[in-house]
Image: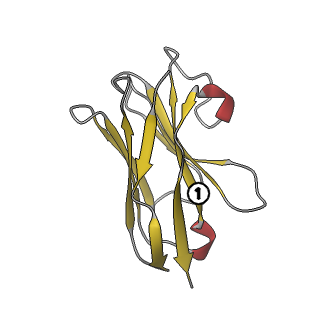
């Protein structure tokens, strides 16, 4: 099982930026499909961004496309999520996830991922 640790959340104003990090402490990320999800109070956990480990293709939810960027540094065994031009509706707990299978069947589905981090809170004020 992978142990994932997310960091970088915080309280910011609308229009500001944040950079989230996800580090695997028990497995390497290379060739694994990774994703970021978020969950706001009273709402379901939703897909934010995904990255294929082998093809390096990226995927984004329509609500964050053009504002968020997912990337990885295999040497540091870390996946990042750069959040720019933040909006109050971006407020949520952000979770990192990894698929330990050769290929995540559906990149935006929670069921495609096997391990999750504890989450990091992102709060965007008006």
Q: How many marks?
A: 1
Please provide percent x and percent y for residue 92.
61, 62
Please provide percent x and percent y for residue 36.
52, 45
Quadrant of the snapshot with the C terminus: bottom right
Q: What element carries label 1?
A: strand
| 5 to 7, vertically: above or below | above
Residue 46 placement, left or right of 15: right
Please give the name of the residue rendered at 63% of the width and 70% of the height, measured from the top-left corner.
89
Which residue is nearer to you in this view: 105 or 3?
A: 3
State the residue lying farthest toward the right.
42
Q: In the figure, residue 74 lies in which quadrant?
A: top left
Q: Residues within 10 Å of mark 1 (few under 14, many from 20)?
A: some
Residue 85 placement, left or right of 104: left
| 20 to 108, vertically: above or below | below
| 20 to 58, vertically: above or below | below
State the residue lying farthest toward the bottom.
126
Please provide percent x and percent y for residue 15.
45, 78
The residue tagged 1 is: 93
Which residue is nearer to you in this view: 108 or 111?
A: 111
| 125 to 65, vertically: above or below | below
Please provide percent x and percent y for residue 83.
43, 62
State the residue lying farthest toward the top.
102
């Amino acid at each position: 099982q992978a142990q994932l640790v997310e960091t970088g959340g915080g309280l910011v104003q609308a229009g500001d930026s944040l950079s989230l990090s996800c580090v695997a402490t028990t497995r390497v990320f290379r060739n694994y499909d990774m994703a970021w999800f978020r969950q706001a109070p009273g709402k379901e956990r939703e897909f934010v961004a995904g990255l294929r480990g082998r093809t390096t293709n990226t995927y984004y939810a329509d609500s964050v496309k053009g504002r968020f960027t997912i990337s990885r540094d295999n040497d540091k065994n870390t996946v990042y999520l750069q959040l720019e031009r933040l909006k109050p509706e971006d407020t949520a707990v952000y979770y990192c996830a990894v698929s330990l299978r050769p290929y995540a069947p559906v990149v935006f589905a929670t069921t495609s991922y096997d391990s999750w981090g504890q989450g990091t809170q992102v709060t965007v004020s008006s």
